[in-house]
Amino acid sequence: MTARLLDGKLLAESVKQNLKKEVDALRQKTGLVPRLANILVGDDAAAKTYANSQKKVAQDIGIDYGLINLPEDISQKKLIESIEELNRDPGTHGIMIYQPLPAHVDYRLVAECVDTAKDIEGMKPANLGKMLLGGAKIIPATPAAVMEHIKSTGVKLRGKEAVIVGRSEIVGKPLILLLLEQSATVTVCHTGTVEAGLLTEHIARADILIVAVGKAGLVKGEWIKENAVVIDVGINRIGKTIVGDVDFESASQKASYITPVPGGVGPLTVVMLMKNTIEAFKLQVKG
Ligand code: NDP
């Protein structure tokens, strides 16, 4: 069979329309709109391009967006002071810090200074802990984008074999909790799985396969279960092209649904950050 394509741009558009309606309703109810403050340290051109695309998505939805561009040589103390100022500002509801930060700054320490209610990246221990308890409102953006793609297929997760390849803090680990919350049976693979020679065995069982490794074409079509839903989070640059962690050509002969790279998970990730900004607003502003 040939898999149906999970088009991230199309899905992002439809989620954006829903978020726009939500922001309109919040404006009517409270007289306010959510505001997202993005902190960018230094002059990295790629980060500025990304910031511009975020600004456009925010504006499309009706979120007020502010880029705070600080000098490369800013001290850690001054950077923390800027964050604390945003924490105190009742008009700022979400704070995001671009990575990487300059080498003299400890990202973890700085990120820990963001107010938990404004942590729209959802990576503070308190927000990760809420995911463990279930029903969290702020979910890290990439795992949230993966779950949105799965939801769009209409496939019910209860009792399904979900296999995640990759256990990073920003993708694999949060997905364990999100899939478990939907009552999937979850397996997580990593380098230890590879060393044990068990990677293909686990992948062959997956009704839902999520790959977030960072190795071009790692997962081959012949490893994949017939009719699996395949979500490829990987972004690998090969010369001027970008490819995923799944060999798209062969995998799309086996899967029922598959995300392309680029154009699958990526476009939804920014939209999920905006969703988190709206959730943060709702937690902070009582209408
Ligand atoms: P990390 O490097 O933090 O984690 C990679 C994970 O893959 C680790 O858990 C590692 O195992 C595991 N791994 C490495 N090699 C293998 C292998 N051969 N087989 C199985 N598992 C393996 O990566 P990230 O999670 O940050 O990113 C993964 C990919 O997703 C990258 O390509 C990145 O660019 C992309 N990405 C895309 C995003 C998007 O919005 N679309 C957002 C974030 C990331 P171990 O823990 O044992 O070392």
Image (cartoon, rainbow, N blue to C red):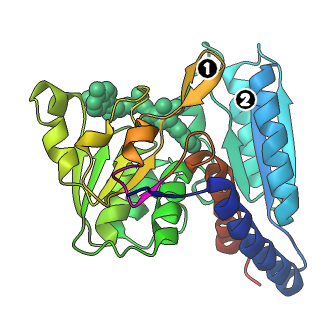
Query: Does the magenta stretch mainly form a helix, a strand or a loop?
Result: loop
Q: In the image as oriented, which residue stretches furthest toward the front?
A: 1
Q: How many marks?
A: 2
| Mark with earlier residue (2, 1) | 2
- Badge 1 residue CB within 8 Å of ligand 1: no
Amino acid carrying label 1: it is: Val
- Badge 2 residue CB within 8 Å of ligand 1: no
* Ligand number 1: quarter of image: top left
Quadrant in which the C terminus is drawn:
bottom right
Magenta highlight range: 253-258
Q: In the image as oriented, which residue stretches furthest toward the left?
A: 196
Instruction: Tell me the residue at 24%/53% (across/down).
Output: 225
Rendered image quadrant of residue 81: top right
Q: Which residue is mark 1?
A: 105
| Pointer 2 with pointer 1, Cβ within 8 A | yes
Q: Nearer the viewer, residue 37 or 264?
A: 264
Left or right: residue 219 versus residue 81 is left
Residue 132 point in image, percent of width and height:
34, 62
Residue 80 point in image, percent of width and height:
68, 33
Q: Which residue is mark 2?
A: 79
